[in-house]
Image (cartoon, grey):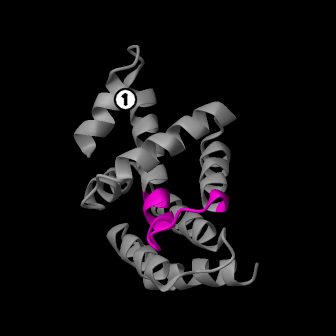
C-alpha cells in the first residue's frame, strides 16, 4: 500500500519533499477514514461526503483536491490487507494531539450515516490503539460524538 501511495504521490510533477510528506499524510488519514466507513460493508453517500469535508477542512485544501484524495483512498483501501502502513505513516508524522484528532474524525465518519455499527466501533478502537492514543482519549472522543 505504501508503494501505491508513493507511486501516486511521485508520479505527479516534482514538488518539494514537504509537500509529498503532507500529501502522504492526507492520503493515509483519508484511507483510515474510508476503512472505518467500509467496516459495515457499506459506504454511504453521507460517509463519503463527511470524509471529503473532513479532508478539505483538516488540510485546508480545495474541494476538488479533497474529493480526489477521498476517491483515491476509497479505491486503494479496497485492496488493503493491513492498517499498519497508514498508521505507521501517521505515527511518524503526527503529534499525539493530531492523532487524537484523527480518532475524533473516525468517530465523525462512523456517525455520519446516523448509526455506529459494532464493526465500525471495533475498528476505531483498533486504529486508536495502533496510533498509540491513550484509552482515556479514545473514550473522550467517542463521548464527544455521542453528544451530537
Query: Residue 143, image x and y in percent?
Result: 64, 84
Query: Residue 94, image x and y in percent?
Result: 43, 53
- The reply, left or right, for residue 52 in relation to residue 9 is right
Label 1 element class = helix
Q: Total number of numbered labels?
A: 1
Residue 65 drawn above or below residue 50: above
Which of the pair 71/55 is nearer the observer?
71
The residue lying at 45 percent from left, 28 percent from top is 19
Q: Which residue carries the number 1 mark?
A: 9
The residue lying at 42 percent from left, 79 percent from top is 125
Residue 131's image quarter?
bottom left
Residue extending farthest to the right is: 148
Residue 59 drawn above or below residue 129: above
Specify few, some or many for label 1: CA neighbours under 10 Å numbering under 14, 14-19, or 20 or more.
some
The residue lying at 59 percent from left, 65 percent from top is 109
Which of the pair 13/19 is nearer the observer?
13
Confirm whether the magenta stretch covers residue 70. Answer: no
Confirm whether the magenta stretch covers residue 43. Answer: yes
Q: Which residues are magenta?
A: 32-46
Residue extending farthest to the top is: 13
Query: Residue 72, image x and y in percent?
Result: 45, 40
Residue 144's image quarter?
bottom right
Query: Residue 50, image x and y in percent?
Result: 65, 57
- The reply, left or right, for residue 76 in relation to residue 142 is left
Amino acid at each position: 500500500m505504501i508503494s501505491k501511495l508513493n507511486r501516486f504521490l511521485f508520479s505527479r510533477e516534482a514538488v518539494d519533499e514537504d509537500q509529498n510528506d503532507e500529501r502522504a499524510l492526507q492520503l493515509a488519514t483519508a484511507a483510515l477514514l474510508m476503512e472505518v466507513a467500509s467496516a459495515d460493508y457499506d459506504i454511504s453517500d453521507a460517509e463519503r461526503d463527511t470524509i471529503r469535508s473532513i479532508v478539505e477542512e483538516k488540510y485546508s485544501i480545495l474541494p476538488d483536491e479533497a474529493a480526489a484524495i477521498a476517491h483515491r483512498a476509497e479505491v486503494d483501501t479496497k485492496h488493503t490487507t493491513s492498517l499498519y502502513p497508514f498508521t505507521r505513516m501517521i505515527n511518524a508524522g503526527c503529534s499525539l494531539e493530531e492523532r487524537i484528532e484523527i480518532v475524533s474524525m473516525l468517530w465523525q465518519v462512523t456517525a455520519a450515516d446516523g448509526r455506529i455499527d459494532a464493526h465500525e466501533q471495533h475498528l476505531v478502537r483498533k486504529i486508536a490503539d495502533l496510533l498509540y492514543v491513550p484509552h482515556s482519549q479514545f473514550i473522550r472522543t467517542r463521548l464527544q460524538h455521542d453528544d451530537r
